[in-house]
Image (cartoon, helix red, strand yellow):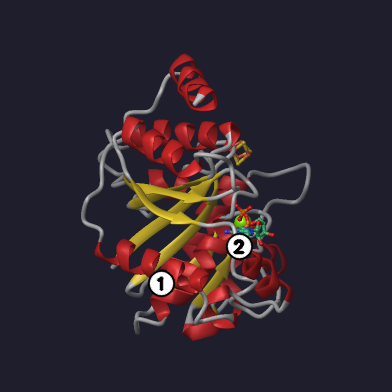
Amino acid sequence: MKQIALYGKGGIGKSTTAANLSAALAGENLDILQIGCDPKHDSTRMLMHGTWIPTVLDLIRERGDENITVDDVVHRGFGGVRCVEAGGPEPGIGCAGRGIIATFQLLERLDALKGDVIVYDVLGDVVCGGFAMPMREGYAQEVYLVTSGELMSIYAANNIAKAIARLSRRVRSRCTLGGVICNAKNIEGEQELVEEFARRINSRLIAYIPRSRVVQVAELQKQTVVEYAPESDQAAVYQELARTIQRNETTSIPTPLEMDELESFALEFVQV
Ligand code: ADP
Ligand code: SF4
Ligand code: MG
């Protein structure tokens, strides 16, 4: 079983990429479990045709975790992908990270943490102990950083790389960096910039996902691109990403950049 996690800045395209990746993997006849670990709880919405599935944390709050069954928390979406949303704390109180732990513990107890591939979709703006939980506790074993060429998303990716480097020294955590995914914002020289960033942190660019209108059109139809436009170039990009991740055996311990290195790196590319 492969356990992969997509980490990146909020709004960078993690859920879109994760849902299309899961849909494409399911198309290869694999049993896929996608777990949304972002309090925004919209990771699996396109796989579920727009339905907001109940979050594990809401169910635990309503019923207590003793009275929850697999069918309450695991919902089958497009291609048979099993979808789970961890959910978030009540606004103003509670810890999102603790919610992620509670979700994983419940799924383990229900024997639902299984399949050919588990895809964790995790927010990476703050790499606090909470959001690092899937990496810390040995769930997320292969992390993929989703970034564009914008400095703030590279900054977030670099912080996640710092967390991976630190956690890789722990026995319990088995996390390594699988690669960097560029989800383009159409910045000049973006692919080269992200490629070079990946190289400098001891990783590699494993996919370049172009910005495409079909993503929004599919979203309006409440579907992934893989379902809505399976013959499109964009769907082919997600299918290639799925094959690359499925075959990937080259992971690394990242060498994150210091802040001044990151700033001078960004300057090099702006000046080009
Ligand atoms: P995140 O999960 O990182 O917060 P989302 O996946 O929700 O981000 O994406 C944010 C927005 O960006 C969505 O409206 C989505 O349709 C759009 N988007 C993501 N990737 C692409 C892309 N490659 N081309 C066009 N729009 C995209
Ligand atoms: Fe939020 Fe992270 Fe602190 Fe938990 S550990 S309260 S998720 S910042
Ligand atoms: Mg998301």
In the picture as drawn, the residue positioned furthest to the left comes out as 249
Q: Is mark 1 within 8 Å of ligand 1?
A: no
Q: What residue is shown at x 63% (from left), y 46% (from top)?
A: 10
Q: What residue is shown at x 57% (from left), y 80% (from top)?
A: 229
Instruction: Find residue 117 and report its image quarter.
Output: bottom left
Which disc number belongs to residue 212? 2
Q: Quadrant of ligand 2?
A: top right
Which disc number belongs to residue 268? none
Q: What residue is shown at x 58% (from left), y 42% (from top)?
A: 187
Q: Is residue 140 above or below residue 236?
A: above
From the image, tell me which residue sits under label 1.
Answer: 239
Residue nearest the viewer, comparing 168 with 144: 144
Q: What residue is shown at x 46% (from left), y 46% (from top)?
A: 133
Q: Is mark 2 within 8 Å of ligand 1?
A: yes
Q: Find residue 35 and report its horizontal and vertical position in percent.
A: 51, 64
- What is the distance, in whole Å, between disc 1 and disc 2 at their CAs? 15 Å
Mark 2: which amino acid? Ser
* Disc 2 element: loop
Residue nearest the viewer, comparing 37 with 59: 37
* Disc 1 element: helix
- Count of all numbered marks drawn on residues in the image: 2
Instruction: Find residue 161 and report its image quarter.
Output: top left
Among numbered discs 1 and 2, the one appearing first in the sequence: 2
The N terminus lies in quadrant: bottom left
Q: Find residue 241 and report its horizontal and vertical position in percent.
A: 39, 64
In the picture as drawn, the residue positioned furthest to the right comes out as 92
Q: Find residue 263 and report its horizontal and vertical position in percent.
A: 51, 19
